[in-house]
């Protein structure tokens, strides 16, 4: 028997069922790529679940806002009114009073949440919301001056609030400019400018007559009282312009989270992207502020809550907008129906947001090394 015939006759090696064959053993690079792919799919699935849950929550709160009040209507009656049918009693209460108020809450909350998340991602700081860095104060001061000094309302008041917010953002950006991004310097200068503008607002109110003080105070608290379809038009225009632009820039905005140098290395025009997002976010924020007044803590808290829900590395913009809508709707229900007296929604968001902010700061300081 030859050596060749001996090799042909020998049986093939047997492998246990639990042991992979040599062809099935993957090199480390393939295993790493598979782990990354699975984690990416899990992240996308988690974000979709979060968005779906938030959409259901907003829809439930919206329906509750239309059904509940001094007189309670059934969901069927509310849907009939929305469909354009005449329902005795409900057509006026739901169609003319509750529906504009609830719609304003959804859109204004989404605008505050979206604008706040944009600034926090742009400046890579959880506390860098328009309320903290002075841009909201600029819109407030311009609007209060419009109410007290010029007697403005409606679209004219919205316009002067947008101009005030844009001018304040431009002034803060110019003062913080050092030839390249300086987020820490921008935040500190924004806090200082905001404090000065708050002082101007108080000075305007001290010199105003009694009626103007009451009107400006109600507006500064942040309220949905007196919401109408006509008053909602500027906010609708601001969102119609701003949301598509922010969606188009969202990929560059996500890349900026890696840092200016890394983003520039990946082909992002850092300064142009930063200026464009700031301008669009200010317009969205200012139109919401002019519509409802500055509802406290919404723009500050929606971004961190959304980031915690979707996890690291995924865009929190859409979840932040939905959280803003749910926050304003829910707090308005509490302010209008669950307290001994009726309060503006800004009072409830101020209390709830203040408590959450304290918890957030305590958690952040615990993570820092001693």
Image: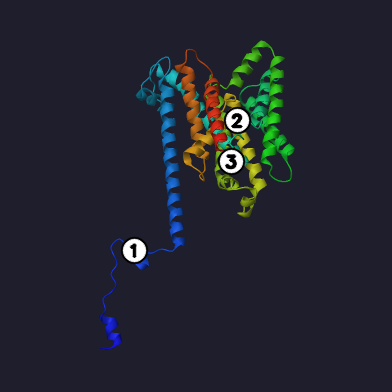
Residue 160 shows in this picture: no
User: Going from the N terminus, do you reach mark 1 or mark 3 first?
Assistant: 1
Instruction: Sort mark 1 into few (<14), some (14-19) or many (20+) by Cα contacts within 10 Å.
Output: few
The quadrant holding residue 90 is top left
* Nearer the camera: disc 1 or disc 2: 1
* Label 2 CA crowd tier, 10 Å (few <14, some 14–19, many 20+): many
Residue where numbered disc 1 is placed: 20
The residue beneath circle 3 is 121
Mark 2 highlights which residue?
Answer: 287
Which mark sits nearer the N-terminus, 2 or 3? 3
Q: Nearer the viewer, residue 358 or 334?
A: 358
Q: CA distance from mark 2 to mark 3?
A: 21 Å
Mark nearest the camera among 2 and 3 is: 3
Where is residue 69? Give x, y as percent.
Answer: 43, 17
Quadrant of the drawing holding the N terminus:
bottom left
Task: Tell me if residue 365 can be seen.
Answer: yes
Residue drawn at x 49%, y 30% as measured from the top left: 325
């Amino acid at each position: 028997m030859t050596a060749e015939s001996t090799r042909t006759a020998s049986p093939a090696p047997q492998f246990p069922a639990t042991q992979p064959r040599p062809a099935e053993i993957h090199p480390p690079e393939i295993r790493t790529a598979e782990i990354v792919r699975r984690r990416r799919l899990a992240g996308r699935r988690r974000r979709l679940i979060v968005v779906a849950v938030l959409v259901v929550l907003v829809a439930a709160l919206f329906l509750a806002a239309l059904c509940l009040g001094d007189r309670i209507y059934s969901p069927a009656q509310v849907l009939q009114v929305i469909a354009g049918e005449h329902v005795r009693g409900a057509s006026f209460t739901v169609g003319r009073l509750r529906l504009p108020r609830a719609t304003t809450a959804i859109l204004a909350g989404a605008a505050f949440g979206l604008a706040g998340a944009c600034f926090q991602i742009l400046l890579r700081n959880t506390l860098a919301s328009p309320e903290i860095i002075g841009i909201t104060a600029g819109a407030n001061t311009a609007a209060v001056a419009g109410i007290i000094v010029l007697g403005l309302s409606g679209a004219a008041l919205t316009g002067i609030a947008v101009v005030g917010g844009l001018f304040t953002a431009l002034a803060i950006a110019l003062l913080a400019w050092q030839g390249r991004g300086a987020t820490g310097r921008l935040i500190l200068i924004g806090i200082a400018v905001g404090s000065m503008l708050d002082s101007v607002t108080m000075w305007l109110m001290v010199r105003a007559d009694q009626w103007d003080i009451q009107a400006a105070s109600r507006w500064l608290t942040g309220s949905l009282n007196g919401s109408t379809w006509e008053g909602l038009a500027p906010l609708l225009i601001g969102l119609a312009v701003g949301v598509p632009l922010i969606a188009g820039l969202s990929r560059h905005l996500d890349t900026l989270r890696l840092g200016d140098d890394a983003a520039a290395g990946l082909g992002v025009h850092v300064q142009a992207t930063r200026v464009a997002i700031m301008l669009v976010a200010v317009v969205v924020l200012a139109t919401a502020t002019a519509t409802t007044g500055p509802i406290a803590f919404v723009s500050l808290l929606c971004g961190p809550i959304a980031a915690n829900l979707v996890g690291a590395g995924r865009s929190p913009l859409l979840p932040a907008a939905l959280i803003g809508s749910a926050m304003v709707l829910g707090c308005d229900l509490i302010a209008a129906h669950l307290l001994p007296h009726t309060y503006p929604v800004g009072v409830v968001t101020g209390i709830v947001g203040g408590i959450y902010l304290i918890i957030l700061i305590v958690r952040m300081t615990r993570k820092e090394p001693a």
